Amino acid sequence: MGCGRKDDAVGHDDMDLRVHDRVALDEIALYAEVLTAVAITERRLTLEELDNALGLRTPASH
């Protein structure tokens, strides 16, 4: 995909080769990143935290 997300190399190499939908797999990986970020906090995520979880912005890029 090459869109600059931190999950560009999610590790699709070890998956079942019958799965061909990379877009769906990338969306699932993004969803998992958001769920992980939500799970580790007891409050709503800020937009900055959500961007960080999605790999859109890194803490050093402020």
Image (cartoon, rainbow, N blue to C red):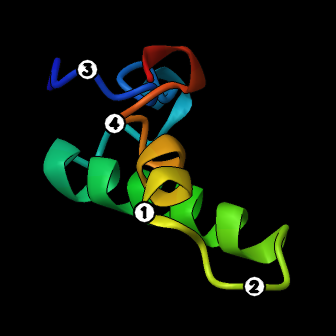
SS assignment at label 1:
helix
Position of residue 35 measured from the top left corner of the image (x, y, whole percent): 61, 72
Q: Which residue is mark 2?
A: 43
Callout 4, which amino acid?
Leu
Callout 3, which amino acid?
Gly
Q: Quadrant of the N terminus?
A: top left
Q: Which residue is mark 3?
A: 4
Check if mark 1's residue and mark 3's residue have beta carbons within 8 Å.
Answer: no
Callout 2, which amino acid?
Arg
Q: Which residue is mark 4?
A: 56
Position of residue 48 measured from the top left corner of the image (x, y, whole percent): 47, 52
Q: Nearer the viewer, residue 57 or 39?
A: 57
- Residue at screen point 82% across, 73% down: 41
Check if mark 3's residue and mark 4's residue have beta carbons within 8 Å.
Answer: yes
SS assignment at label 4:
loop
CA–CA distance between discs 2 and 3?
Answer: 27 Å
Callout 1, which amino acid?
Leu
Query: Residue placed farthest to the front in the image?
Result: 62
Chain-order first, disc 3 or disc 4: 3
Q: Quadrant of residue 16?
A: top left
Vertical comparison of 62 with 23: above or below: above
Check if mark 2's residue and mark 3's residue have beta carbons within 8 Å.
Answer: no
Q: Nearer the viewer, residue 24 or 56?
A: 56
Question: Tag 1: Cα neighbours inside 10 Å, few (<14), some, or many (≥20)?
Answer: few
Q: Quadrant of residue 33?
A: bottom right
Q: Nearer the viewer, residue 6 or 59?
A: 59
